[in-house]
């Protein structure tokens, strides 16, 4: 048990600016203003309806804002665990194709960009959760900085796309962890 604890390592996620939350807050404020305006102008609606709707919107906005800050990349024993917003992915290091892993800039490698959100949380410059790549492969993403993305293909054909603060350090740690288990 202590051998597993000795290999637990947390890798910092590349920071994502707080101003990106404007992509959440501005639409929520617009919805709240629209609800207030239509409720006050309608004879069929009562202002009491606002007593349920506006607090619900406030709580929803608070939960989505708090989720934005939930990001973690950690090596636990021989597993890579990624937590992001409402999503979590745990992958055995042996399931990674580290010989094909690389650090990429998505502006230069547009073919590697996740394009279809299947079950995720996203806004411009921030992707979290499950996506599809251009070539239809599944991808689990924690992307906060598209200029330094660690692209990790898995043996099952899917992909992990991560934005650690130091992607080369994470890749080196994964390669070092996989080295003793290699049979080649």
Image (cartoon, rainbow, N blue to C red):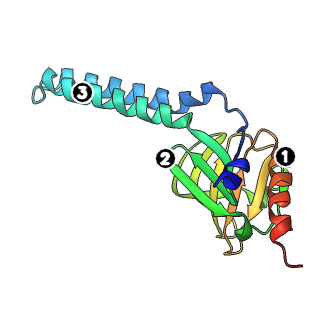
CA–CA distance in space, label 3 to label 1: 54 Å
Give the quarter of the figure containing the N terminus: bottom right
Q: Residue at x 66, y 69 (%)?
A: 158
Mark before the other along the chain sequence, 2 or 1: 2
Which mark sits nearer the N-terminus, 3 or 1?
Answer: 3
Residue bearing the label numbered 3: 38
Which one is in front, 44 or 101? 101
The percent position of residue 133, horizontal first and vertical second, equals 67, 63
Q: Which mark is residue 169?
A: 1
Q: CA distance from mark 3 to mark 2?
A: 33 Å
Whether residue 76 is visible, yes or no, is no
Q: Tell me the element at label 3.
A: helix
Q: Residue furthest right?
A: 184
Of tags 3 and 1, the one toward the viewer is: 1
Task: For marks 2 and 1, give the one nearer the viewer.
Answer: 1
Which one is in front, 127 or 35? 127
- Where is residue 41 shown, x and y percent of the image? 19, 22
Of the image marks 3 and 2, the number of the one nearer the N terminus? 3
Is any atom of residue 39 visible in this view? yes
Q: Quadrant of residue 152?
A: bottom right
Furthest residue toward front: 2
């Amino acid at each position: 048990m202590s051998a597993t604890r000795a290999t637990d390592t947390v890798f910092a996620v590349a920071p994502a600016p707080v101003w990106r939350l404007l992509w959440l807050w501005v639409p929520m404020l617009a919805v709240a203003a629209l609800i207030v305006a239509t409720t006050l102008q309608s004879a069929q609606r009562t202002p009491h309806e606002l007593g349920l709707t506006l607090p619900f919107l406030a709580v929803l906005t608070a939960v989505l804002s708090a989720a934005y800050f939930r990001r973690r990349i950690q090596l636990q024993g021989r597993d890579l665990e990624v937590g992001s917003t409402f999503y979590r992915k745990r992958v055995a290091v042996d399931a990674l194709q580290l010989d094909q892993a690389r650090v990429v800039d998505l502006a230069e490698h547009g073919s590697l960009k996740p394009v279809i959100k299947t079950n995720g949380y996203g806004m411009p410059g921030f992707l979290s959760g499950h996506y599809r790549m251009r070539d239809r492969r599944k991808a689990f993403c924690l992307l906060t900085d598209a200029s330094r993305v660690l692209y990790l293909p898995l043996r099952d054909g899917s992909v992990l796309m991560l934005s650690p603060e130091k992607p080369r350090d994470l890749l080196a740690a994964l390669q070092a962890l996989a080295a003793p288990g290699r049979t080649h």
